[in-house]
Image (cartoon, rainbow, N blue to C red):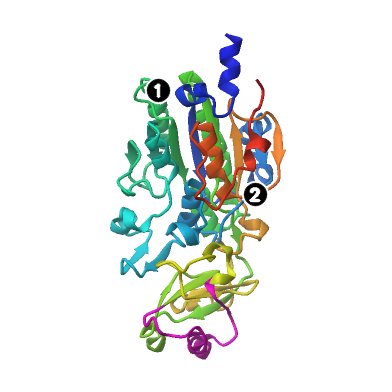
Amino acid sequence: MRLIFLLLLIPGGIFAQLDTVTILISYDGFRHDYVEKFDMKNFKDFLSEGVAADGLIPSFPSKTFANHYSIVTGLEPGHHGLPANSFYNRELKKIYVIRDREAVQDGRFYHGLPIWCYAQQNGLKTASYFWVGTEASINGCKPDYVVPYNAKISNRSRIDGMIEWLNLPKEERPSLILGYFSTFDDLGHKFGPNSNEVKEAAKIIDDELGYFLSEIKKSEVPVNLILVSDHGMEDMAGYEPIFLDNDNRALRSKYLMFNAGPFVYVYFRNKNTEFLKAVEDFKKVLGNSVNYNSPERFKSFSGVKQPWTPDLILSAPKGKIILGEEHREKHESGIKEGGNHGFSPEMRSMHGIFYANGPSFKHGAKINSFQNIHIYSLLVNILSLKQYDFIDGNDFLLEKVLNQEQ
């Protein structure tokens, strides 16, 4: 019996593949310091018994869809097809916006090999409760079990749904389950990361984790539970707005503009437009109030220019944010409250969480912050899959977090 138990602990061992279920949960907007800041006791117990990173560094831009898909592909947003929450794809001649169900479910926007597809190629079943990309058929692949996004479904119901999958007969049970909760992001945007509303939400989320863990224990199924977030949250109180008129005819006739806040993506309607000419056009409206960046300046857009790569990126200087003209009346005298993300991944407030617990992980280990593109190799290993090389991340995490006892 002891030999079987020890084999279960071996990362990549056959018992891990056959018996252990890996559950990857994302808490959108869960900042790196919330557990201590809000004294989240269930989270404290969870990370003290497993692995805890000082923070999880998002990829640029620190936006929701871009980073969720980076986590499950190991690719930078500029390489996997979702460079932001909204953008233009020249090849498809289509706009992607996260609230457009048709676009979200169009597999042609998604590139790379998502972990659920790689797992299925190796005979494993997978399931998703709201993870980005899982509603689309990507090269003919979707998880075996998928719940389409519905914000009205409570966190407790989502947990119950994942537990139902965990309690399926062994031959039907998914080896990989993905789940998503948006509470911190929703309230962080509206009230700011230091608000009482976020503090109160932290108590509820902590209780929900306690419930989740108790239900996992009742199932008697060995589980590797990984808790992550796509980004943190910056307190916007005191930020100075820069107003950009999205209806400016001179600009709209030549350019497509997407996103706002920390950055704006600009796509040239005429492919022969020169970069410096575009900068000149925007300076007529914005002057030197923003930074004018070539995409190549960002690691996310290194290499060959892709159909979704913007031609120009406007970024707000420190302490400022780009808003549409329609927000002038409310914010002309400055931002009073709220939160935002999308800023440079180097900003500490943009860092999220990485906590992991289960038979494959070390006990009580603390590691430095790392970029989220490295999680893919970890998932590949604990699912007993062959290492996949066509990613931007690497396997440095394995030695740091996996239980090597034999």
Q: Which amino acid does label 1 sit on?
A: Asn
Left/right of residue 242 with respect to residue 40 in the rendered view:
left
In reply to whether residue 125 is colored magenta, the answer given is no
Q: Look at the image and give the residue range highlighted in magenta.
A: 268-295
Q: Is mark 2 on a helix, strand or loop?
A: strand
Three-letter code for the amino acid on which mark 2 is drawn: Phe
- Horizontal side of 210 relative to 50 (left or right) equals left
Q: Quadrant of the N terminus?
A: top right
Could you tell me which residue is drawn at 48 percent across and 26 percent down?
A: 17
* Residue 170 relative to residue 10: left or right: left
Give the label on residue 339, or none.
Answer: none
State which mark lies toward you, 1 or 2: 2
Neighbor class of circle 2 (other Cα within 10 Å; few <14, some 14-19, many 20+) is some
Residue 8: x percent and y percent? 56, 20
x and y, in percent, of residue 310 in the image: 46, 72
Q: Which of marks 1 and 2 is nearer the N terminus?
A: 1
Residue 199 appears in the rendering? yes
Number of residues whose C-alpha sits closer than 10 Å to that of mark 1, classed few (under 14), some (14–19) or many (20 or more) = some
Snapshot quadrant of residue 227: top right
Say which residue appears at 44% left-offset and 39% top-offset: 178
Question: Which residue: 49% across, 72% down?
Answer: 264
Which residue occupies the foreground of this view, 98 or 6? 6
Q: Mark 1 points at which residue?
A: 167
Q: Are marks 1 and 2 in contact (CB under 8 Å)?
A: no
Report the residue marked by disc 2: 370
Q: Is residue 72 left or right of residue 93?
A: right
**Furthest residue to the top?**
1
Can residue 222 be seen here? The reply is no
